[in-house]
Image (cartoon, helix red, strand yellow):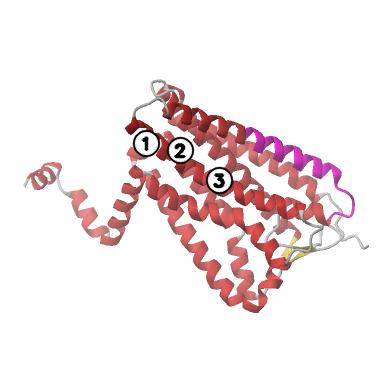
Amino acid sequence: MEIIANVSTSFVLLGLVEMEMQKYLYFSFFTVIYLFTLMINSIIVLVVLKEKTLHEPMYILIASLIFNGIFGSSSFFPKLIVDLITSSKTISHSECLIQTLCVAIFAMLEMSTFTVMAYDRYLAICQPFQYYTLMTNAKVLRITATCWVTTFMFAVIAIVMAWQLSLCGNKIKSIYCDNMSFIVLSCLDALVNRIYAAVVTSSYFSITILVTVFSYFRIFIVCLQISKESCQKAIHTLVTHLLNFSIFLMGFLFVFLRYRLEAVNLPLMVHVLLSVTPLVFPPLLNPLIYGIRTHALKMKVVQYLQILNEGPKWSNFQMDLPAKLVKHKEVH
């Protein structure tokens, strides 16, 4: 079999070939999904940044999670939309590597952020009197920055290893590139790449899942010992985080199963659906779930949307009024 040189390789995305017959339908659908995802995620991030009352660890972590959703969606949606309308079905070797890097960073950051959020809720519910000492805004920002640096390092190492592979083939059963795409196309066994991917993935996800499960378990135990009203608030928080965490885990499980079913003759569209699940649903559903179930955030988002709907004129006029006049108006 001919070995394709890494420098000049361009890959054929078979998912785009499969969509060619109905490309305008897919173009319209994915454009609406991406724009809606971009809009709702951006609004929540802006609200958290602008509202000082939301400058707390939990809301900073929500904003970090949702910003990561924007990053993950943007790693493949823009190119997919352009490819559909232009009937392009290929991606260059360098673009494929960059896309692989972005997808890997998104997946690992998603797990990291969910884990830190679970630990944050554990401290808030199980150690409420020490919470504001143990979990400060500065500490959350440091943890978030550490997660970004760590995931970037792990992802870059995987990309460097993938770049060095000699490839026999150029067809990818998806609509975007990921690390396993290179391993599957490798002429050799790519044992080192497989071991690195397995060790990093299993270790990273095992640690984050264990910390998350431990945090939720401790929260559940405390819920059984506190008052009914406090228990309802804790359960509300617990359900919100578990719902988001489960959505991402199911998506990741689909991708994991997809590469373990290579010997099974699955329809190409099944491969496409399994591959896009973790990149489409979490960024789309996370802001909707947090926007609905987190009361303070929901109220600020509604206020922000009302201001946008009314326009800047009345908002600026009200801001320019002297404080005493505003107060006098409120009294009367």
Question: Secondary structure of the magenta portion, mostly?
Answer: helix
- The quarter of the picture where residue 112 lies is top right
Q: Is residue 227 depicted above or below 164 in this figure? A: above
Q: Residue at x 80, y 51 (%)?
A: 183
Residue matched to label 2: 238
User: How far apart are labels 3 and 2 at the CA level?
Assistant: 12 Å
Q: Are marks 1 and 3 in contact (CB under 8 Å)?
A: no
Query: Which span of residues is magenta-colored?
Result: 186-208
Residue type at mark 1 is Gln
Q: Residue at x 52, y 30 (%)?
A: 217
Look at the image and tell me whether residue 157 can be seen. Answer: yes
Q: Residue at x 71, y 38 (%)?
A: 202
Q: Is residue 244 left or right of residue 97?
A: left
As helix, strand or loop, the secondary structure at mark 3 comes to helix
Residue type at mark 2 is Leu
Q: Residue at x 76, y 59 (%)?
A: 93
- Examine the structure image and report whether residue 190 is included in the region drawn in magenta: yes
Dot in front, 2 or 1 = 1
Residue matched to label 1: 232
Dot in front, 1 or 3 = 1
Residue matched to label 3: 246
As helix, strand or loop, the secondary structure at mark 2 comes to helix
Look at the image and tell me whether residue 175 can be seen. Answer: no
- Count how many numbered circles sit on residues in the image: 3
User: How far apart are labels 2 and 1 at the CA level?
Assistant: 10 Å
Q: Is residue 146 left or right of residue 7?
A: left
Q: Is residue 107 left or right of residue 288?
A: right
Q: Position of residue 32 (x, y in %)?
A: 49, 67
Q: Position of residue 52 (x, y in %)?
A: 34, 39
Residue type at mark 3 is Ser
